[in-house]
Amino acid sequence: GLQTSNTIFETLKDLSNDHPAFGQKILIRILMTDDEDRRDQVIRATNRQTAVTDASLYATETIQRDIEQFLLGADWYYDRRKNFYKNAGKKVSRIVGILSLAQSLMAAGLNRPDDARARPGSVIKKDEVYRSIFDAGIPLELYLWVVESQAAVDRELAAKIQDRATRNNLRFHALTALTTIMAGRTVDSLGSLKAIAKRDNLPNGVDVKLAVVTAQEAFEGYIASCGLRGEAVAKGRDFIGQLNAASLAAADEAASTTSTENEAPA
């Protein structure tokens, strides 16, 4: 493969043409197939001897190809092969990687924005965690919903907060707040998330703004009370209880306001 051929080239490039090494032969096995499943099996098997990221190995799975194809239909580019779409000239703002989607799934569906923020690599390092968020039984529209929701949250944060560090600390927590507000309860499994994560139920601007404000106010209030730095709060589990409580209160208030408006005389 590329690593082997590059190593041979680097070793021999400065040797004279009559060096004995050029008389040696290397056995090469070439596999030719149009079967993507077979190709990905070979990629996965032959890269086990070197250090390869977990995301790269998972990229060969059928569920990952299915997500890629589904997102393409909505003009999102799922970069299961790192930098594939970037090198193809696609807009960076429309490219989503496996790890970034996994982080958003942890925040939106498992109520774990702290892990998404603090331990992005470990999100898919444990097989049981990976299987809980990437499964053939999960509707593909859920993945699109999470991608669209995270993008909406990120846009609102960019418009509201100038400091990049603060935005990074809040983006997953605001997404958690959004799912809580839309569901009217804490969402801690993708099975629960399926109830709202539908293509025809993307979050509206009101819900997104409310989620960002709720997360920001809860975040700032917690920092003021505990004296910790923002990054430490975002990466810690202790803040999640306060975030959930604030999000549920916001959901109740929003529901009450909607009910009052509906009951008002015409």
Image: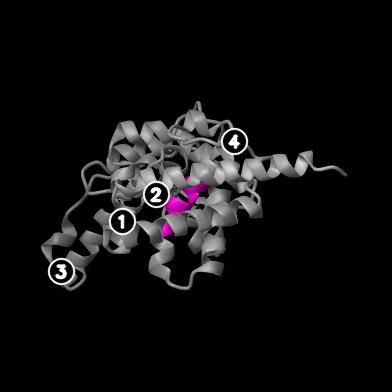
Q: Is residue 122 depicted above or below 228 in this figure?
A: above
The percent coordinates of residue 60 (x first, y second) are 41, 39
Q: Which mark is residue 18?
A: 3
Check disc 2 and give the amino acid type.
Leu
Q: Is residue 243 depicted above or below 158 in this figure?
A: above
In this rendering, the label closer to the viewer, 1 or 3:
1
Check disc 4 and give the amino acid type.
Ile
The percent coordinates of residue 128 (x first, y second) are 32, 31
Crowding near the residue tagged with mark 3, few <14, some 14–19, many ≥20 C-alpha atoms within 10 Å: few
The secondary element bearing badge 4 is classed as loop
Q: Is residue 179 among the parts visible in the rendering? A: no
Q: Residue at x 44, y 64 (%)?
A: 167
- The residue identified by callout 1 is 233
Q: Which mark is residue 196?
A: 4
- The residue identified by callout 2 is 99
Membership of 128 in magenta stretch: no
Q: Earlier in the sequence, mark 1 or mark 3?
A: 3
